[in-house]
Amino acid sequence: MNIDGNPTRTIWPAGDVVEIIDQTRLPHEFVVKRLRSLDDAAEAISVMRVRGAPLIGATAAYGLALAAARDVSDAALCAAGDSLIATRPTAVNLQWAVRRMLARLLPLPAAQRAAAAWAEAALIADEDVVRNQAIGRHGAARIEAIAARKAGPVNLLTHCNAGWLATVDWGTALAPVYAAVAAGVPLHVWVDETRPRNQGASLTAWELAKHGVAHTVIADNAGGHLMQHGQVDLCIVGTDRTAANGDVCNKIGTYLKALAAHDNGVPFYVAAPGPSIDFELASGREIPIEERGAEEVTHIAGLDAQGRLASVRLTPSGSRAANPAFDVTPARLVTGIITERGVCAASREGLAGLYPECG
Ligand code: MRU
């Protein structure tokens, strides 16, 4: 993605440190933060300076490279992997990246491990970009097919942020948007605000604006109404973990959008790169759902009257709040899964057809 004309990824190595865009400061401030250690990487994932399943995976890979720069023993690398996996439970990309890094590093002699860790992390990041570009091509074909049947712009609804900021580059759910716009398809995106962390209002809106894509931010509760009134042609969302049967776990609220889409005959697609599919889980019921802090519900962040970042309370101080961060959309509500290998049915057979080696 170009940020003010400069091609920019969301994470990159810089000498012996790693740099990230601190997403807790967007959309109001663009701040690059340095990760100097394993602990910095783990903190960035848990407080969501980086977030989105593919980017969490890439950050964990670089976190292991930072750990290997200090201690390459088996014990130290395995402990580093455990501490990274403990940061967030739902996105399977985190475990996938840690397992891949350890499988690459542990068989090597100690003297080769540190260099190999940086190289493997860079490979994981580069592969994410290639995968997302392919998802973009496959998804754009679905958008173009709708554009060919209607006058005026295609109206696409997305939930949370599954864009450039959630990956190393391009995004998953938004990659088809960028590809379709590049192909000249008239397109408008409805952006769910995505309470409680507001990834839609803060991040999706910011990156679409930077890219010049027409969009409108809506309250989370507005999507069903827009679908009833023919104002949504298709939905595309991302996924943190898709089970082998096609059940899709994604940001809390995705399920309600899928129900509304189903009720209104609106196609509901999920963009899922291979590392977000967990072939070890038979169904979505087995996916661990992260419970985050109540303050993400009781408070909201924004700019105060002086233009400073501030957090304000929304709820009565005595009210308890609950914060399940993800939900599971049953496969029966999903029109298709857009992967880097093509689009398939949200089913065991559909996924196994595209990933026969994982069956
Ligand atoms: O809590 P977050 O912001 O990490 O949740 C992100 C999502 O739910 C995304 O939709 C998902 O990770 C797919 S990102 C390409």
Image (cartoon, helix red, strand yellow):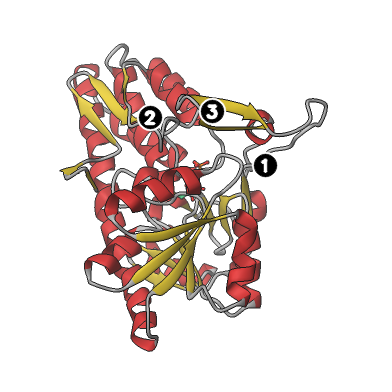
**Callout 2: 10 Å neighbours few (<14), some, many (20+)?**
many
The residue at which mark 1 appears reads as 324
Viewer-side label of 3, 1: 1
Q: Amino acid at mark 1?
A: Pro
Identify the residue under disc 2: 22
Residue 11 in the image, given as x and y percentages of width and height: 29, 34
Report whether the residue tagged 2 is closer than 8 Å to ligand 1: no
Q: Does residue 102 appear in this view?
A: no
- Residue drawn at (20%, 32%) of the image: 119
Mark linked to residue 86: 3
Q: Quadrant of residue 121?
A: top left
Q: Secondary structure at mark 1?
A: loop
Residue located at (43% from left, 26% from top): 44
Taking the view exactly as shown, the residue that stands out farthest to the right is 318
Q: Residue at x 34, y 63 (%)?
A: 177
* Apparent side of residue 326 relative to residue 205 in the rendered image (left or right): right
User: What is the count of numbered marks?
Assistant: 3
Specify few, some or many for label 3: CA neighbours under 10 Å numbering under 14, 14-19, or 20 or more.
few
Residue 301 x, y percent position in the rendering = 55, 32
Of mark 3 and mark 1, the one earlier in the sequence is 3
Amino acid type, label 2: Asp
